[in-house]
Amino acid sequence: MVRKTLTIVVGAGLGAAIVAAVYFLFFANVPEYALSVSPIISEGQFGTYTHVVIKNTGRRPVTNLVVDYGNNTKPDVIPVLNPGDRILLSPPVGSNLSEVRVTTAEGIDIVKQYIRPPGGPLVGIRGF
């Protein structure tokens, strides 16, 4: 009887330790609200290609994302972006192609400059 109880207690303790380790490894360092913003510009023989990739890297959904491209162009508004989801946007004609600003209802405010990837022209984003 004592041996069976000891086995149950040790098994429960190991189970709790594994759950705690998984939590701390994968979830403890992830902020509640966070975004990754990647504005990309590439020039090729057929013109200039621009994309803005936005990914929710936080644990909770972000709401009312406003993507401001500058130069008084119409911003993109995304109602909800769930954790792990990403979206690919194309700036409208007349946008300021030096930087983009992304804000959310949760208080995120990110300004990023466009990057020019090394190599040839970018027609699409690989791995999107």
Image (cartoon, rainbow, N blue to C red):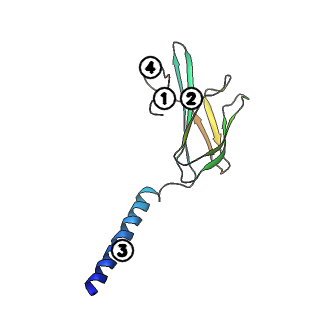
Q: Which residue occupies 58% across, 52% down?
A: 33
The crowding category of the residue bearing disc 2, from other C-alpha atoms within 10 Å (few below 14, some 14 to 19, many at least 20), is some
**Residue sitting farthest toward the left:** 3
Instruction: Give the SS element for disc 4.
Output: loop
Q: CA distance from mark 4 to mark 3?
A: 56 Å
Question: How packed is label 1: few (under 14 Cα within 10 Å), some, or many (20 or more)?
Answer: few
The part of the image, by quadrant, that contains residue 39 is top right
Mark 2 and mark 3 in contact (Cβ < 8 Å)? no
Which image quadrant is residue 14 in? bottom left
Q: Relative to 3, say whether 33 is above or below.
A: above
- For the point 57% across and 25% down, the residue is 50
Query: Residue at label 1?
Result: 125
The Cα atoms of the two marked residues, 2 and 1, are separated by 8 Å
* 93 shown above or below 8: above
| Label located before the other in sequence (4 or 1) | 4
Do labels 3 and 1 touch, CB within 8 Å?
no
Amino acid, disc 2: His
Across and down, in percent, residue 89 comes to: 60, 32
Left-right relation of 117 to 49: left
Residue found farthest to the top: 45
Q: Can you identify the residue that label 3 sits on?
A: 12
Q: Dot 3 lies on which element?
A: helix
Q: CA distance from mark 3 to mark 2?
A: 50 Å
Disc 4 to disc 1, how far (Cα)?
A: 12 Å
